[in-house]
Amino acid sequence: MPWRGPEVKGEFPTLGYHIGDWIEGNLIVPDGDRMGQPYLLTDEMWHFLLRLYRLRPDATADMGSEAFVYYGAQLVRPQKWGKDPFAAALICAHALGEDQFAGWDARGEPVARPHPSPWVQCVATSEDQTANTFAPIVTMLRDGPLADSPGLDIGETRIKLPGIGWIEPATSSGRARLGARLTEATFTESHLMVESNGGVLLAKNMKRNIAGMGGRWIEITNAWDPTEQSVAQRTNAAKAPGVLIDYRPPRARVDLEDDAAVLEEIRYVYGDSIRSRGGWVREGRILADIRDESTGENEARRYFLNETTGGASDAVDGIRWAALARPGEVLAPGAKVALGFDGSRNRDATSLVACREDGRIFHLRTWECPKDAKEWTVPRIEVDQAVRDAFAAYKVGYLYADPYRWQDYIDTWSAAWPDKVVEFPTNVEARMDRAIERFLTAYKAGELTHDGDELLTRHAGNAALAKGKRKPPREDGGLPEFYLRVVKKRHGVWIDAFVAAILAYHARGKAVEDDVWKDSVAPWVMYA
């Protein structure tokens, strides 16, 4: 008889319950302080499993893998969420359990059977990556309840299954894997599988082999760099109807200096794997890894916050930046300038920078959190006074200010100087991209110069350019472009003066376009 039909709203037929029960009854935790205990699935894992093994209501026993709604799946989660042991458990279930659809029983419930000749490969770009999935399989089988199964030969590099079948790692070239008899494969860290290392060809060939054998595949991956066109990115972008995509993106782009916001986002993206919810991930340790000065901002966002973000390059070349320095010159009272303001409340720095009408940048004031300070807040009254002094000393065209955490002061400044203060959120990629492009164009052409200030130079050297979200499709059908972002090269350094300089230069451009200084005369330049 066919499936009995839903008994509650949203119910669908699945072998997931059967597979999950088999995993929890036959496998152990492969490492960590719970090593050797029964491997218990989290609610998130159960949710993925039920959908992965979802059946078509009209499926028949002779349909093979076509009985399932999905022939492939992608699981995107942050570092240490537990992707590799979970994938290892799914491989064991395919190799030794009953994960093939065998029809419906007399009550309309699905029936499962073992695969007659399972051949599974753990695929990655390097042996170290394949070991992340293959090593847990070895421990789960060798030290667990299935260790003495007849015909099971557990080797360190290959596992012979009872009857016909194998579990093995695979890192060879795409051509070498052509024609392999595969019934299931896992692609470990598919965000690392790109054209340059042969990963894209490898994945294409293996997925084609699996399709020919009526098998299924799973990608387990961290968030990807959108500039690399990796296998993970291609799979996610394609959104093929037969591929289950399980990706939990961050809810917002949090300020990495805001402990409360970062911890809240960690709890969200790690879900049930957080220790306080019965899991194994200590959120404080993840925060410490994000705070580690050797961890770049992009790396922290991709690997720990599940955010797809592009690779980074130096924002400025040190030699070029030095060539554009004009030390010794100071702004004369009454000079026509635009201002850029990038603020923070604590931990980070707050900067005020001016750009003169001719395109020369002057560092006015920066407040940095002392390196050894446990408790520190920006002296907001001093900052407010510095802004007021700048308006009093110079003929200010516009002040472009990032409003984050400074909204109340910006409102006050707007009231004091109507039509002069412009809120410029630096986290709005489309808008910030235009400011960065203006700055870089002038920088490369030598139209932009600066006062050679040591702190501004240090902040510029700490900055990197990263590619953010994809821009809208081009009308000419050309290659996709991405918005530019300015990020820190690593945690624990400051770039606020450089960001303020970008805002100041952009504000100067707008002031020139609007001809806001038309009725004033530039004073003579003063030298220190």
Image (tube, grey):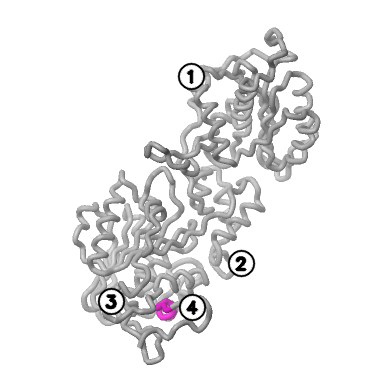
Residue pointed to by mark 4:
11
Alpha carbon of mark 4 to alpha carbon of mark 2: how far? Answer: 30 Å
Residue 445 is marked as 1
The quadrant of the picture occupied by the C terminus is: top right
CA distance separating discs 4 and 3: 22 Å
| Image marks 4 and 2: residues in contact by CB distance under 8 Å | no
Residue 19 occupies which quadrant of the picture?
bottom left
Residue 14, magenta (yes or no): yes
Residue 276 shows which numbered tag?
Answer: 2
Q: Secondary structure at mark 3?
A: helix
Q: Is residue 432 above or below residue 332?
A: below
What residue is at 42 percent from the left and 69 percent from the top?
30
User: Which is more toward the observer, 137 or 379?
Assistant: 379
Ranked by sequence position, the earlier of labels 2 and 1 is 2
Instruction: Find out whether the residues at labels 1 and 3 contact each other: C-beta distance under 8 Å.
Output: no
Residue at x 46%, y 62% (from the top left corner): 246
| Foreground tag (1 vs 4) | 4
Against 323, is 104 above or below? Answer: below
Rendered image quadrant of residue 185: bottom left
Foreground pick, 473 / 361 = 473
The amino acid sitting under disc 3 is: Met
Badge 4: how crowded within 10 Å, few (<14), some, or many (20+)?
A: few
How far across and down, in percent of the image, does residue 307 sit?
Answer: 51, 51
Of the 4 image quadrants, the one containing the N terminus is bottom left
The secondary structure type at the circle numbered 1 is helix
* Image: magenta residue range: 13-22
Q: Nearer the viewer, mark 2 or mark 1?
A: 1
Q: In the shown orientation, is residue 395 left or right of residue 43? A: right
Of the two numbered discs 4 and 2 on the same chain, state the one appearing first in sequence: 4
Residue 125 appearing in the image: yes
Q: Which mark is residue 63?
A: 3
